[in-house]
Image (cartoon, grey):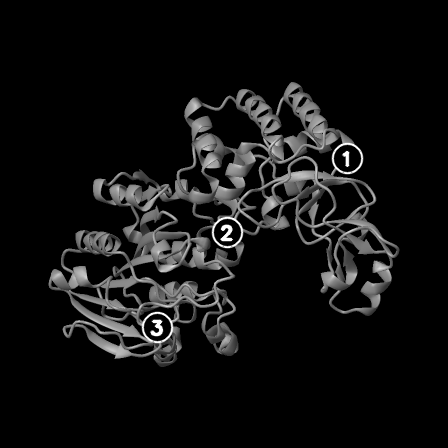
Amino acid sequence: MGRHLKKIETKAGIDRRETGYYSTPDFVAEFIAQVLIKLNPQGRTALDPCIGQGEMVIPLLNQGISVEGMDILPFDLPAVINFTQTDFLQYYQQKKLLSIFNTPIDLDYDFYLANPPYNCHELTYIRDNKTRLSRLFWDIGVHNMYALFIAALIDCAKPGALIGLITLDSFLTAKAHQNLRHKILKTCAVHYLLLCSNDLFLDQGADVRTCIMILQKGTDYQGTVKVANRTLNQRDFQRILIQKQWTELPLEKITLAGEADNSEFIIDIPDEIQNLFESPRLGNLFSCVTGISTGSDRTYLSKDPRPGFTIPFYKNPGSCRFFTKPNAYLVDDFLSVAETIPNFTIRNKSLLYQPGITCSSMGVTFSACYLPPNSTYGVNANIITSDSDTWWLLAYLNSHLVTFIVRSLLNRSNMITSGYVARIPIPKFSRIALTQMSVIAREAYLNQVSPKAARQYVEQINQIIWKDLNFTEETRVKIQNFCKNLIRVT
């Protein structure tokens, strides 16, 4: 959800942002139910821990499955559902406390279904219960509600139990959720991982990226995984589910498992690109760092240079490529300020003022611009380079290949920190390709190109990379289509 949305009410007057409740579309509920029953035709019992108005369990009820539900609010549910008004996370905590010597909980349900609350980490519940939740979820951390629900369901499930989820997909790649991914892979088989269209909940006021994931408790059940990439709209997504237009892959093909990786789940990635992750990473070759956090930009930054504020400060090129003006000008005595103001933080002090590349930090688009000498920078990713490497690397970082790598593999959320940028693989380019890319990037910088004008330079760089890496036409088209529809497919 957009952070500017402070209150989103249902027709019944329930604040969606506070409760995290969003109604599951009927065709999604039907699909998940069909999959669960197909995987275990003998299943007879189900639990939905955030049942809402019961959308997800209706298809199971129609098949004669006995359903129990929990929720913090009492909705108008069919009488056949055994409903308990309770906080599932507190219920889970009680079960954990009752388990002797940390033995498995193993609730006696064959199926679990959940569309967990989509609340961000600032939610009052998490803030007010942070200490308790941190002890309870020591293994995955406390970052948001949906991740807690997933972890709790896994712990509650008996061996062989199936878990059908539709939930936010930030856990697939975000570094904060690496322990949740490890928990899933260590304890469950993954049967389905399908990215939903971004407009799936749009009619309810939520512009969110979600996925369907079907798990089974126990890794012995692991076979191939049915995966599908995000479609441009809900109609196409529904067609994929109905016509079963997915790909079946071994688990190792949908995870990044290198030493520098964090078991990210990846979808629809060509082998040519996945193989690049065997190359050295950017952070192994160059210093990829953050700089200054002022604690109060209004106090220590000036929009324009003026007496006392003359040091160029870069913190986010945004949509600019190759060339960007400083975002602001830093107070001249910032070193003294940092010694006296606790929340004015300078990281990597020895690397300040050195030239290199400054990268975008927020937004869907990933971009990079030249960082001039004698500049400072914020908490976005900044790469310190020698002049011989600056220009080809600047060209590469602005290519569609890197946009694809960053936005479809490394992080599907909107914030790209130095940790993600440092993990970008650096292919072994020919000397001719390096020279050609350097010339193009330097020219774009000297011309101070606008974001629109930069497109022609990016296309030239793309063509050099396609040729030098000998990518197939299929891979090229996949990358180009992804970048063309970036907002709708990330």
The residue positioned 58% from the left and 40% from the top of the image is: 424
Select label 1 or label 3 by which is in front. Answer: 3
Which is more N-terminal, label 2 or label 3?
Answer: 3
User: Is the C-beta separation of discs 2 and 1 under 8 Å?
Assistant: no
Q: Amino acid at mark 1?
A: Ser
Residue 254 vs residue 207, the one in the foreground: 207
User: Which residue in the protein does label 3 denote?
Assistant: 13
Residue type for callout 2: Ser
At a point 39% along the width and 71% down the height, the residue shown is 15
In the displayed structure image, the side of residue 438 where residue 132 appears, left or right: left
Within 10 Å of disc 2 (Cα), the crowding (few <14, some 14-19, many 20+) is some
How packed mark 3 is, by other alpha carbons closer than 10 Å (few <14, some 14-19, many 20 or more), is few
Give the secondary structure at mark 3: loop
Q: Nearer the viewer, mark 3 or mark 2?
A: 3
From the viewer's perspective, tell me whether residue 270 is left or right of residue 159. Answer: right
Mark 3 vs mark 2, CA separation in Å = 30 Å
Separation (CA) of disc 2 from disc 1: 31 Å
Crowdedness near tag 1: few (<14), some (14–19) or many (≥20) residues, C-alpha within 10 Å: few
Q: Secondary structure at mark 2?
A: loop
Q: Position of residue 383 (x, y in %)?
A: 70, 42
What number is the disc on residue 413? 2
Q: Which residue is mark 1?
A: 386
Give the SS element for disc 1.
loop
Q: Quadrant of the N terminus?
A: bottom left
Examine the rendering and report whether any part of residue 118 can be seen: yes
Q: Would you say 376 lies left or right of 134 here?
A: right
Residue located 51% across and 61% down the image: 3
Q: Quadrant of residue 80?
A: bottom left
Q: What is the quadrant of the C terminus in the image?
A: top left
The answer to which image quadrant residue 452 occupies is top right
